Image (cartoon, rainbow, N blue to C red):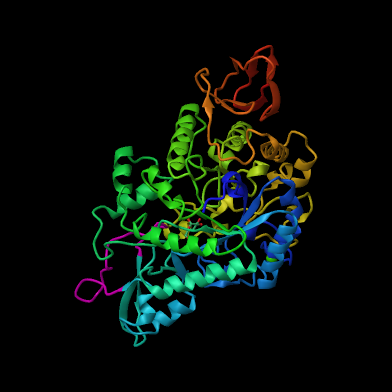
């Protein structure tokens, strides 16, 4: 059932990466109590909900996305009592709480996997994963030629109990993340138990990790171009012809198969069985993008991340096309669009836009554009502070991507550096050495400092979210309508009714344009917007919101 006024149709959801948010017990890593201690800060932003990256029991080989027990908290983050306390303390501040579940794989430290390797070929314990005999005279060739997304082969061979070389198991990511077999009923039942476990504890919904990966097809067939496929899947590979990439991504035997939808239909029934609203958002990279709508049909998931902006240049034509296409695609199934500028897997927005003052200027303008759009927006911790990626020595790196590519790909640690809160030791994040070094240069970016600076990035985010929550053209509505206004090259101009207008200038020079008589400035990403009569002058790389009678 679609509840017309549902909050998630126009939500601002803030991603907390718990390990890097706030340490409460002096071990150099963030934890749940730390998040609780910062809830007032989170509430001050004007967001609707927080989404927490995984804090479950995990050997932490992939930042906790290698889950050893999906129904327990890892001691480094606290315990179940802390998780419950966090949900309650957030609810007291009218913040909803979304947890991150990882159904595509379990850590090889999960009891099931340990049971699988100590059980014989063909056992029910092995059937929960993808175990197969190898090819070749001695089974020395993997069952197929797929590559791991993190580099290297997608298969690892185990040693059987008797010491002999044994079967291979599939892992699309790190070798410590064994893919689950979703054709197996026990796997399905176990996940339903996990969903209910957290829903009963009071969580408001889930972010579903690798939601497009659960169903696999042709698992015993070689792919015609496994290396090309992995390159096509990697966002940092830029020297690939568009047609080649599109061809490879249009049919990936382990992503976006029909089989995933039946799983989400069954999950939706579970969400609906709760009295209060429980929601879900899919992390699913699909091609062509029109396939995204299939995940948010009315009996499946609520939102799907739209990653167009995550990889978008600050270019008006590109952005207008992305917005138009997204709105058409999701409105076909009556789902809200979403907009994501950054997350824990990608370079920070300011860095992606070139870094430095100009990068920050563009990032602020980009954020203000994003916050004006219909649908759900996502903010990754530190994005509101205009943080850049931290420069890290290779010796500090922890991401498996770095190790599995032998350092060719530096990995994602640069975007996972702890939050600089204040001018205290270690920026108030911890009182010991933080798990990743925090750059000294961030002393000009702390929350404390930005709180007191009227024009800081932090206060820009607060103010834009405040207006977004209040303005009758922007606040929750089912109306996805945007009216595009003709504008000079490099300028995005749009209206939302009643009475809202946005102008974003992506040019290196200022522009002048007609905005109609009586337009008033609501907020601007940079100083210098001038309105005289019916004309506005907008400085370079600046977005402004105007109200019109
Ligand atoms: C998702 C997560 C990423 C993780 C991967 C494997 O893409 O966002 O951090 O490494 O899944 O679980
Ligand atoms: Ca800690």
Horizontal side of 383 relative to 119 (left or right) equals right
User: Residue drawn at (46%, 42%), measured in percent from left and top?
Assistant: 330
User: Residue drawn at (62%, 17%), measured in percent from left and top?
Assistant: 515
Horizontal side of 160 relative to 83 (left or right) equals left
- Expressed as whole percent of the image width and height from the top left, the position of residue 32 reads 68, 64
When the figure is inspected, residue 516 is found, relative to residue 39, above or below; the finding is above
Which segment did they paint magenta? 132-154
Horizontal side of 264 relative to 360 (left or right) equals left
| Residue 484 showing in the rendered view | yes
Identify the image quadrant of residue 172: bottom left
Horizontal side of 319 relative to 157 (left or right) equals right
- Expressed as whole percent of the image width and height from the top left, the position of residue 485 reads 53, 21
Q: Main secondary structure of the magenta part?
A: loop
| Residue 79 showing in the rendered view | no
- Expressed as whole percent of the image width and height from the top left, the position of residue 479 reads 55, 36
Identify the image quadrant of residue 451: top right
When the figure is inspected, residue 483 is found, relative to residue 400, above or below; the finding is above
Magenta-span inclusion, residue 137: yes
């Amino acid at each position: 059932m679609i509840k017309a006024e549902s909050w998630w149709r126009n939500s601002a959801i803030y991603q907390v990466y718990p390990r890097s948010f706030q340490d409460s017990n002096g071990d150099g890593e963030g934890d749940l109590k730390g998040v609780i201690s910062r809830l007032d800060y989170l509430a001050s932003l004007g967001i609707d909900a927080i989404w927490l990256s995984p804090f479950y029991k995990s050997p932490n080989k992939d930042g906790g996305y290698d889950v050893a027990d999906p129904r327990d908290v890892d001691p480094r983050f606290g315990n179940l009592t802390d998780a419950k306390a966090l949900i309650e303390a957030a609810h007291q501040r009218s913040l909803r709480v979304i947890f991150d579940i990882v159904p595509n794989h379990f850590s090889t430290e999960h009891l099931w996997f340990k049971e699988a390797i100590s059980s014989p070929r063909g056992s029910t314990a092995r059937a929960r994963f993808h175990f197969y005999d190898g090819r070749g005279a001695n089974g020395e060739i993997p069952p197929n030629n797929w590559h791991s997304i993190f580099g290297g082969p997608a298969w690892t061979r185990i040693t059987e109990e008797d010491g002999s070389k044994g079967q291979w198991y599939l892992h699309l990511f790190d070798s410590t993340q064994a893919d689950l077999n979703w054709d197996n009923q026990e796997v399905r039942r176990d996940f339903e138990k996990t969903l209910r476990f957290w829903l009963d504890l009071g969580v408001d919904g889930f972010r579903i990790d690798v939601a497009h990966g659960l169903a696999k097809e042709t698992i015993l067939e070689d792919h015609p171009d496994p290396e090309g496929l992995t390159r096509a899947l990697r966002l940092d590979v830029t020297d690939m012809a568009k047609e080649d990439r599109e061809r490879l991504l249009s049919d990936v035997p382990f992503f976006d198969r029909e089989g995933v939808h039946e799983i989400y239909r069954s999950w939706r029934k579970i969400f609906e069985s709760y009295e209060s609203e429980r929601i879900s958002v899919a992390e699913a990279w699909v091609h062509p993008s029109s396939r995204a709508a299939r995940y948010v049909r009315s009996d499946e998931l609520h939102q799907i991340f739209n990653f167009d902006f995550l990889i978008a240049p600050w270019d008006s034509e590109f952005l207008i096309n992305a917005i138009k296409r997204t709105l058409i695609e999701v409105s076909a199934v009556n789902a809200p669009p979403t907009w994501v500028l950054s997350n824990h897997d990608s370079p920070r927005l300011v860095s992606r836009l070139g870094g430095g003052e100009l990068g920050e200027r563009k990032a602020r303008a980009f954020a203000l554009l994003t916050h004006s759009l219909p649908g759900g927006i996502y903010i990754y911790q530190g994005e509101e502070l205009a943080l850049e990626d931290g420069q890290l020595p290779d010796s500090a790196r922890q991401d498996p991507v770095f190790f599995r590519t032998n350092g060719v790909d530096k990995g994602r640690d640069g975007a996972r550096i702890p939050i600089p809160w204040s001018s205290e030791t270690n920026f108030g994040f911890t009182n010991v050495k933080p798990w990743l070094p925090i750059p000294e240069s961030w002393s000009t970016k702390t929350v404390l400092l930005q709180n007191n600076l009227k024009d800081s990035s932090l206060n820009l985010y607060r103010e834009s979210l405040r207006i977004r929550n209040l303005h009758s053209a922007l606040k929750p509505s089912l109306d996805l309508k945007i009216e595009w206004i003709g504008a000079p090259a490099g300028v995005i101009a749009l209206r939302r009714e009643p009475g809202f207008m946005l102008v974003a200038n992506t040019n290196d020079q200022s522009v002048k344009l007609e905005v109609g008589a009586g337009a008033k400035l609501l907020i601007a990403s940079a100083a210098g917007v001038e309105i005289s009569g019916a004309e506005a002058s907008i400085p370079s790389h600046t977005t402004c919101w105007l109200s019109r009678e």
